[in-house]
Structures are given as C-alpha cells and as structure tokens.
Amino acid sequence: MFFLYKILTKTRMSRIFPCIFYKLTGYQCPGCGTQRALHSLLHLKIKQGLLYNQILILAIPLVLLLIYLEHFNGKNRFPKLYKTLSGKTFIMITLIFILIYWVGRNVTILPSLPPP
Ligand SMILES: [Zn+2]
C-alpha cells in the first residue's frame, strides 16, 4: 500500500480525489488536504503535513489504536479503554472536535494551505 501510494503520487495522478465540497463552496471540509498531508508524511515532512490537515495527523495514532483494539485482541486486553473509545460520549466528543476544526480552518484560526 505504501509503495503503491508512493508510485501514484509521483505520477500525474497526484490529485486523485479532488474535494467536491471545496469546488462547490470555496470552503475547506475537514478532509481537505488529507491526500497532501499523507504525501508529506510519507516524505517525513511533518510540519508541511500539519499545514495541509492537522486533524489527520492527530487522528493517525487514534486510528492505529482503534485498529489494534478491534482486530488484534486489544479489546480483551484493554476492555475499559475499548469501551471508552467505542462509547457514545467519545464519538460525540470526536464529532464536536471535527466540527470545531471544520469551522476553525475556514475562519483562519488554524494555519492551513488551501487546495491547489
Ligand atoms: Zn474537502
């Protein structure tokens, strides 16, 4: 997967998934810059990745943890953590955080690079 992404992003297909929300409204969605942020991370340009999409960089450790808990017997080893992260409260907090991020990146509270 890593090498496929590296090959694809070196070709002219560097913009595989243009953002429809951005094209229609001129505002960035929470996912805008994800592809460019991943590309930057793969090239170990973490600061540049943060400028493209901060929430992705913050979400990567959480996603890895959730994959571990769900698919590698983590929920039996850490049942309390699994229950907390799969609970309604955590999901609501995550959604609120995403909404705040969505607004924040469009009113220039957060530094970000707009889509090309
Ligand atoms: Zn977008």
Image: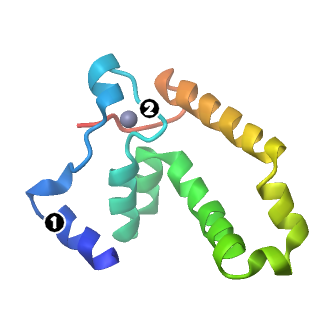
In the displayed image of the protein, which residue is found farthest to the top?
25
- Closer-to-camera residue (78/11): 78
Q: Dot 1, crowdedness within 10 Å: few (<14), some or many (≥20)? A: few
Residue 110 x, y percent position in the rendering:
53, 34
What is the residue that sits farthest to the right in this orientation? 80
The image shows residue 50, relative to residue 46, as above or below, that is above
Q: Quadrant of the C terminus?
A: top left
Which residue type does callout 1 highlight?
A: Lys
Apparent side of residue 77 relative to residue 44 in the rendered image (left or right): right
**What SS does tag 1 mark?**
helix
Quarter of the image where the N terminus is located: bottom left
Q: Please give the residue where the numbered disc 1 appears in the rendered image.
A: 10
CB at mark 2 closer than 8 A to ligand 1?
A: yes
Residue 96: image x %, image y %?
Answer: 70, 33
Residue that carries the numbered disc 2 in the rendered image: 29
Residue lying furthest left: 12
Which quarter of the frame holds ligand 1?
Answer: top left
Q: Residue 64: give its label.
A: none
Q: Residue at x 55, y 47 (%)?
A: 55
